[in-house]
Amino acid sequence: MRRITLVFASLLSLGHLTSAHAADPVGPADPVGPPLGKHPFGVRDLIAFDRIGEPAVSPDGKLVVYGVSRLDLAANRRRSDLWLVAAAGGEPRRLTSHEASDSSATWARDEAGRAWIMFLSSRSGSSQVWRISPDGGEAEPVTQLPLDVGAFIVAPDGKHLALALEVFPDCADLACTRDRSDALAKRQASGKIYDELLFRHWDTWADGRRNHIVAVPLAGGVATTNAAVDIMRGVVADSPGKPFGGSEELTFTPDSQAIVFAARIAGREEAWSTNFDLYVAPIDGKTAPKNITPASPGTDSAPLFSPDGKTLVWLSMPRAGYESDRYRMMARDVSAGISGAGDREIAANWDRSPGELAFSANGKSLFATADDLGNRGLFAIDVATGKVKSLSPTAGTFGAPRVAGQGLIVMRDDLGTPAELYALGSDGKGLRALTHRNGARLADTTRGDFAPFTFAGWNDETVHGWIVKPVGYDAPANAGKKWPVAFIIHGGPQGSFGNHFHYRWNSQVYAAAGYAAVLIDFHGSTGYGQAFTDSIGGDWGGKPLEDLQKGLAAALAKEPRLDGERVCALGASYGGYMVNWIAGAWPDRFRCLVTHDGNLDERMAYFNTEELWFPEWDHRGLPWEHPDHFSKHNPIDLVDKWKTPTLVIHGGQDFRVVDTQGMATFTALQRRGIPSRFLYFPDENHWVLKPANSILWHDTVLEWLARWTR
């Protein structure tokens, strides 16, 4: 799925730029503070929420360990501890408490059969694997390596770890990578020399290191560091893939003697290839990795063995160069070996793209999550027949399904409430909450009601959307009041603004500020069938713009108390591009615009982004071969029609949509004499992640909306 989507938003007002000068810092000393009685939900509540991490269920299905990240305001970051709760319910128990972050917990057994919880922690000064008894006590280091551990999994027999480490591929051992990294850090010359792409990715410049999988034996619960084996040695590729890949991209074989992993070994074509394949390599490193999906031209990932070890399933995209293709669930009989006797697709007629898979205890079903009609649903798929059954007991966003005995543990959130852990039966019945991390803060806030709606969009096809009402909308005192509208456009573009509590574009922040938030899943969005998603290709400013126009009109007709004369449009990434396109293609509609990390010039954007497969697919070719494809819906060509006051926001470390696109947008606005403001974050990437920056983002955006709609 396209990863250039949404931004994260703002924190203590560290100052904003007015004219050509930076203003003095303003804002309270404590920008969050305790809730002061009942109040409309706001960004400070959003920032202060505890955030639940993915669960891990004990082998006996009775206990669930999970991370909880909390705001560390003094350090301008979040930090995480581990918690335990019984799968049957009960009071959660805190397991770790340290100034460092503890996360990514999983279960393991030692030689004596005792259960342990292994996790990542930086408490030793670098990211390493630690373990702790589920009964509590002091945590113990498992690895003490010279390199940071990025992710890890435990072998089924408990005798090895597979670690994701950044190494130089040609290094014979970990010490070589450490020494070479130290030498680079001490080098006085700052120049970087490159002979091929990708020379930078997301927010990081390439320095020759790659994510490699390193197998490390365990003895007495401690890793034998000097026996670490890079099973990918010499391979110029990453596994897990950068920048967002994790432990879901690798798994041990059932006999614990080899590792199956996803990697893109594309050489000089890496910047325009999406061809991730599955490879298998022995943990002793004596033979090179072997490609076990060589015939697949698209992305293959998320390998998973059935409980009996006889079937390998994985997610596979059939088309090369398209990162938003439908993931197919592929199955291979590996009872006679990993090469298998042939592959088959499970549920080939199911027009959804699953994102997470888990086997049932008996291996007969797969549990999956997938975007579905403005929600993210939970499904059970019969492995033999491909029959799909919805297990979602409510609307909302379900994630991280984990089997616990005869039931499931899942995460769930919606437009009004953040994610918590829930238990439910494998038939989708009996949903019950296991955690209530934010109950007190939620009780202190008022939030807007929300509801889906549909309308006839492009070609009279059904398009879905959501309306989040302002706080106080139904109060008797406001019976005749008209409300301004925040028209929020999602990124991707193959994404969705659905029934999800987003921590960057959270519609409740706008509802609390007195705006109705209108969200449209225009053509190109996910969850409505692959043809609907594909339809945006080559038509960025066509079908989606028509859907947005008709969707806004439909929302105003559905809720007549929304003030169609006081509407501002906001978006980031593709949404930022669309705001720039709207500025010229729909110039008389909005009171104000907010564009974050959006392209102004699609022609130049091709040459200064990093993942070239994306524009090559979405704009149907190369710009020198098909220049008309890149100029078809290009915002820069309509600058002469711009007239709407616009707030421009950009991150200096954004290599997906480079910051000069935002600077150019602001320059055009200023030169045309249009009221405009530029908010620049030199330390943020395509998203705004630091808590202080997030509050500043929100405060600046809401101030801009208020200026033009009140």
Image: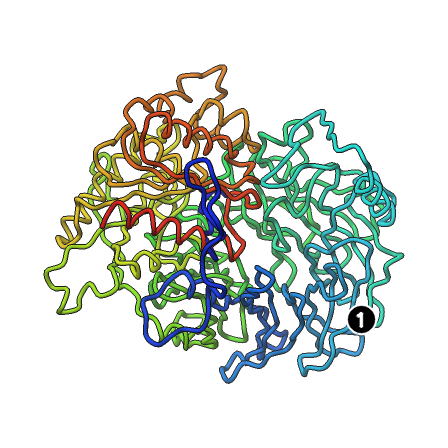
Q: Is residue 262 left or right of residue 507?
A: right
Figure label count: 1
Secondary structure category for the residue under label 1: loop
Q: Is residue 203 left or right of residue 507?
A: right
Q: Which residue is mark 1?
A: 221
Position in image of residue 221 (x %, y %): 80, 71
Residue for point 49% across, 23% down = 604
Q: Is residue 436 visible?
A: yes
Amino acid type at circle 1 is Gly
Q: Residue 83 is drawn in which quadrant?
A: bottom right
Residue for point 50% across, 82% down = 88
Q: Judge whether 184 appears above or below 453 on screen.
A: above
Say which of 639 and 148 sits in front: 639
Q: How is the image coloured?
A: rainbow
Position in image of residue 499 (x %, y %): 35, 58
Q: Residue 199 is drawn in which quadrant?
A: top right
Q: Is residue 493 visible?
A: no
Residue for point 83% across, 38% down = 170
Q: Judge whether 546 appears above or below 408 on screen.
A: above
Position in image of residue 402 (x %, y %): 53, 67
Say which of 648 and 435 sits in front: 648
